[in-house]
Amino acid sequence: MSAVQALSRRTPLNPVSLLRRVQVELGIGNLPTAWLERRYGKPESRFIDVDGIRIHYTDEGNQAGPVLVLLHGVLASLHTWDGWVKALGAHYRIIRLDIPGFGLSSRLPSDQYQPDRAVEFIDRGRY
C-alpha cells in the first residue's frame, strides 16, 4: 500500500488536507518553521546566524573531550547522527549541524547547494 493510500484511509478524501498530510509525512513543502521546530527540534537544539542564514546545531557529549564535528549528507539532517551521539558522547564533545537548506537550517538565498558552496559556507562559520 502506498503512503497516499494509507493516508487517504485515515483522512477524509479532501485533496488539500491529503496533500498537507503527505507533505508532513515526507517532510516536503513549505511547512511553518515553528511547527517544524516543535516536531523535529531537540532539547539540545541551538541556532546561530551565519551571514544571515539561521543554522540549527547541537553541542553535546563530554564537553572536556576531543571535538567531533558531524555533517550529514544530502537530503538528511543532524538526526542522522543520533545513534553516534549516544555511542560516543561519553568520550567526545559532539557538534552537529543541519547544512543550509536541510533539517531546521534556513535556505541559502542563492539556492546553490553544490558541495564547494557548502564547504565555503561552513568555513565562514568558524570565525
Image: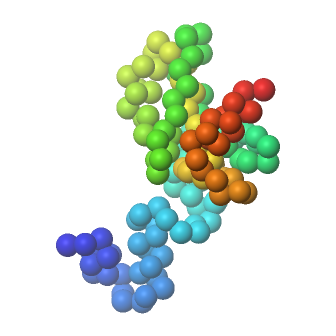
Residue 56 seen in this snapshot: no
Q: Is residue 36 above or below residue 11?
A: above
Quarter assignment of residue 10: bottom left
Foreground residue, 103 or 100? 100
Q: Is residue 50 above or below residue 65?
A: below
Measuring 43% from the left and 88% from the top, which residue is drawn there? 15
* Residue 30 screen position, x and y as percent: 59, 69
Q: Is residue 69 above or below residue 90?
A: below
Tell how many labels: 0
Q: Quadrant of the N terminus?
A: bottom left
Q: Quadrant of the C terminus?
A: top right
* Residue 121 screen position, x and y as percent: 69, 39
Measuring 60% from the left and 50% from the top, which residue is drawn there? 113
* Residue 36 screen position, x and y as percent: 56, 58
Foreground residue, 49 or 9? 49
Colour option used: rainbow
Quarter assignment of residue 65: top right
Q: Does residue 124 appear to the left or right of 60 in the view shown?
A: right
Q: Is residue 6 above or below residue 106?
A: below
Residue at the left extreme, as displayed: 1
* Residue 72 screen position, x and y as percent: 48, 38
Measuring 53% from the left and 20% from the top, which residue is drawn there? 68
Residue 102 seen in this snapshot: yes
Measuring 31% from the left and 81% from the top, which residue is drawn there? 8
Quarter assignment of residue 18: bottom left
